[in-house]
Image (cartoon, rainbow, N blue to C red):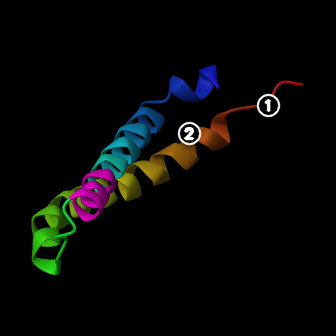
Amino acid sequence: MKELLGFKSFQQILLCLFALGFVVGVLYGIYIFSDKLRYYSIIPFLPVVYFISRGLFKNSRLFFADFKSLTIKV
């Protein structure tokens, strides 16, 4: 696990997953606590979700290339 945290692509993936979880958590909180989640309240979050998914896609290819170079020591 220590080797994975050294990869810059893995750090970026973790950041994107945290941001995606935060956005989903905010939307879920709006739904639970105010009961006023409508389709028009999701629209401001769409650009954020787009940039997060684009970052995940870009960094996943780099991460898998880095992960192949990682050797498992027995």
Most frequent secondary structure within the magenta stretch? helix
Q: Amino acid at mark 1?
A: Ile
CA gap, disc 2 to disc 1? 13 Å
**Residue that extends furthest to the right in the rendered view of this protein:** 74
Kind of element beneath mark 1: loop
| Dot placed on the residue nearer the N-terminal end, 2 or 1 | 2
- Residue 56 in percent (x, y) is at 38, 53
Q: Is residue 69 above or below residue 22?
A: above
The quadrant holding residue 4 is top right
Residue extent of the magenta highlight: 24-33
Which residue is the site of mark 2?
Answer: 66
**Residue at the (12%, 70%) spot, across then down:** 41
Q: Is residue 50 found inside the magenta-colored segment of the image?
A: no
Which residue is the site of mark 1?
Answer: 72
Q: Is residue 25 found inside the magenta-colored segment of the image?
A: yes
Kind of element beneath mark 2: helix
